[in-house]
Image: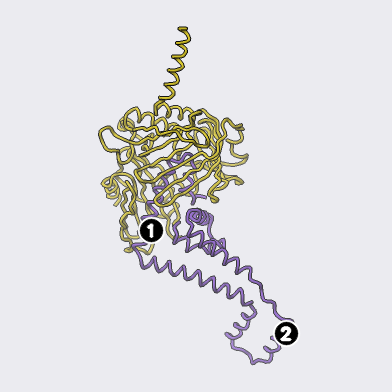
């Protein structure tokens, strides 16, 4: 896994949505790359902060008052009725989710754009991956124990 | 008086012989120590690949060359990985699980592949040795031995030294090409190699390893070298394959193989690595030859035809590479063989 892929999947990792192999590859990369560790820590803290946000408690009698007002209103159109339902959702988690989605989407679009617009970069990255894996297998041969083997086999776990 | 003089002479002679111990003798001692000593401790190994450095810290227990146990302490992602060597095979087990699998290839056999081979090459004049001043490792006095590939009257070979007269021994090369440079710190008292640094090719990559805690003659119980009860051993890890056909079934496309291979080349590993894009997998087929090693890479990137422009291989000392695309398939060959040889292998795949 390289930095670009790590950036792409960091939210999936934080939300525990990666497969076992992808998770292990991610962890191996995070061990080796301090820049991605910072990115991961930032995502993890954002995720935790969003989950830790307090839910706003509605004032006493609010529901009844709102219901009474609704009763007085003319029959809403279907779309307006749908929106009314969503107003019940607490604002803070919704906002938090929006921020998280925007954060993720920005990174995703950026990486997609880079990939699509820079075939040379893509090919260069592929070449770099090939060279790295070859060298990992090479050094694994000369490790004093099979621990070097772990470097090339992280995706097998 | 005569007998006293004779005794004094004998002591002097022995002392002088010890002081003048040759590099070859130290290598033999180190090999002997590897084969016979019971030791335990902690070892830190660093792998310098390109501009990255990977570190592995592990505990080890070893009963000569008979049995070894390794427990990974660092990095965190491999913690609880246990590797046991017994009866000629390495098995990897994750603590707390009921599964283990056989490691598909033997890593370097320290006494055979490095120490004894170095002795042979030294005696053949292919390797030069320099004894540097003694150093202290773990508070113990260590002899520092620097070995370097050298051909008498010629420049150092590019890729290490092939086994002697490989044409007489068709089939798999029994030995790996020797590293370009090796520095060993050998404990004066026991002959144990406490620290080493191997430069596989001039410049990179480098393997550095050092014992950071050492217990001599520890109590080694038999259960240290056994898998927990009920653990079954599979033959391979999930993404390692023994045959091309098995790998093809796993990736869902037909793999291409070279019709030309350098003399003595053997296929060593077939590995499938998922890459970032979930639609793409990278198949790596590794070959070893008496002159070095090379890896053939193949990937399918559906819908990306026409996009691939063969990149200039990133600079790596003594490493040659060739990349190309055919339709949705990407190919690459990387190895420390001469460029012409890499090109020839690539041509035989097209």
The secondary structure type at the circle numbered 1 is helix
Q: Is residue B97 left or right of residue B240?
A: right
Q: Quadrant of the N terminus of chain A?
A: bottom left
Q: x and y percent of residue B210 in the render?
A: 49, 40
Q: Can residue B113 be seen in this view?
A: no
Return the residue nearer the eye: B342 or B237. Answer: B342
Q: Which mark's residue is nearer the viewer, 1 or 2?
A: 1
The secondary structure type at the circle numbered 2 is helix
Q: Mark 1 and 2 residues: CB-CB less than 8 Å, in contact?
A: no
Q: Mark 2 points at which residue?
A: A64
Return the residue nearer the eye: B128 or A111. Answer: B128
Q: Residues within 10 Å of mark 2 (few under 14, many from 20)?
A: few
Q: In this view, does B21 lie to the left or right of A157?
A: left
Q: For residue A117, which quarter of the picture?
A: bottom left
Return the residue nearer the eye: B245 or B75. Answer: B75
Q: Which residue is drawn at 52% across and 44% down?
A: B57
Chain letter for purple, please. Answer: A
Whether marks 1 and 2 lie on the same chain: yes
Give the vertical position of A110 relative to B111 (above or below): below
Pointer 1 chain: A
Q: Which residue lies furthest to the front in this view?
A: B1
Q: x and y percent of residue B22 in the render?
A: 39, 26
In the rendering, which numbered label is found on residue A125?
A: 1
Chain letter for yellow, please. Answer: B
């Amino acid at each position: 896994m390289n930095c670009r892929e790590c950036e792409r999947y960091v939210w999936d990792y934080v939300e525990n949505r990666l497969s076992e192999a992808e998770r292990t590859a991610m962890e191996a990369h995070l061990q080796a790359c301090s820049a991605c560790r910072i990115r991961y820590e930032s995502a993890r803290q954002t995720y935790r902060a969003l989950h830790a946000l307090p839910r706003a408690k509605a004032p006493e009698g609010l529901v009844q008052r709102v219901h009474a007002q609704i009763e007085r209103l003319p029959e809403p159109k279907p779309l307006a009725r749908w929106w009314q339902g969503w107003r019940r959702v607490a604002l803070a988690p919704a906002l938090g989710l929006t921020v998280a989605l925007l954060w993720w989407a920005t990174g995703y679009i950026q990486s997609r754009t880079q990939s699509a617009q820079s075939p040379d970069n893509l090919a260069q990255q592929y070449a770099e991956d090939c060279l790295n894996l070859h060298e990992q297998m090479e050094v694994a041969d000369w490790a004093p124990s099979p621990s070097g083997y772990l470097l090339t086999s992280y995706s097998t776990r | 008086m005569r007998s006293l003089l004779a005794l004094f002479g004998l002591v002097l002679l022995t002392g002088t012989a010890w002081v003048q111990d040759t590099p070859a003798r130290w290598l033999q001692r180190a090999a002997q120590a590897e084969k016979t000593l019971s030791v335990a401790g902690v070892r830190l190994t660093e792998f310098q690949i390109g501009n990255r450095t990977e570190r592995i810290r592990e505990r080890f227990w070893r009963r000569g060359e008979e049995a070894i146990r390794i427990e990974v302490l660092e990095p965190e992602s491999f913690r609880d990985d246990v590797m046991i060597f017994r009866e000629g095979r390495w098995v990897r087990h994750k603590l707390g699980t009921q599964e283990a699998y056989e490691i598909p290839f033997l890593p370097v056999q320290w006494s055979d592949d490095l120490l004894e081979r170095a002795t042979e090459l030294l005696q053949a004049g292919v390797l030069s040795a320099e004894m540097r001043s003694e150093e202290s490792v773990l508070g113990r006095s260590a002899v520092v031995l620097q070995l370097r590939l050298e051909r008498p009257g010629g420049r150092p070979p590019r890729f290490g030294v092939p086994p002697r007269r490989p044409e007489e021994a068709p089939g798999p090369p029994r030995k790996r090409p020797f590293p370009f440079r090796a520095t060993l710190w050998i404990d004066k008292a026991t002959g144990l190699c406490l620290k080493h640094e191997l430069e596989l090719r001039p410049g990179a990559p480098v393997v550095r390893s050092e014992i950071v805690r050492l217990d001599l003659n520890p109590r080694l119980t038999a259960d240290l070298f056994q898998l927990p009860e009920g653990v079954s051993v599979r033959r391979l890890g999930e993404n390692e394959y023994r045959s091309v056909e098995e790998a093809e079934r796993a990736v869902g496309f037909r793999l291409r193989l070279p019709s030309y291979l350098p003399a003595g080349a053997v296929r060593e590993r077939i590995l499938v690595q998922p890459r970032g894009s979930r639609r793409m997998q990278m198949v790596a087929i590794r070959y070893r030859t008496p002159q070095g090693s090379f890896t053939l890479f193949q990937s399918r990137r559906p819908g990306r035809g026409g996009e691939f422009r063969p990149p200039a291989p990133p600079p790596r000392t003594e490493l040659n590479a060739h990349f190309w695309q055919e339709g949705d398939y990407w190919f690459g060959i990387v190895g420390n063989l001469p460029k012409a040889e890499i090109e020839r292998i690539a041509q035989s795949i097209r």
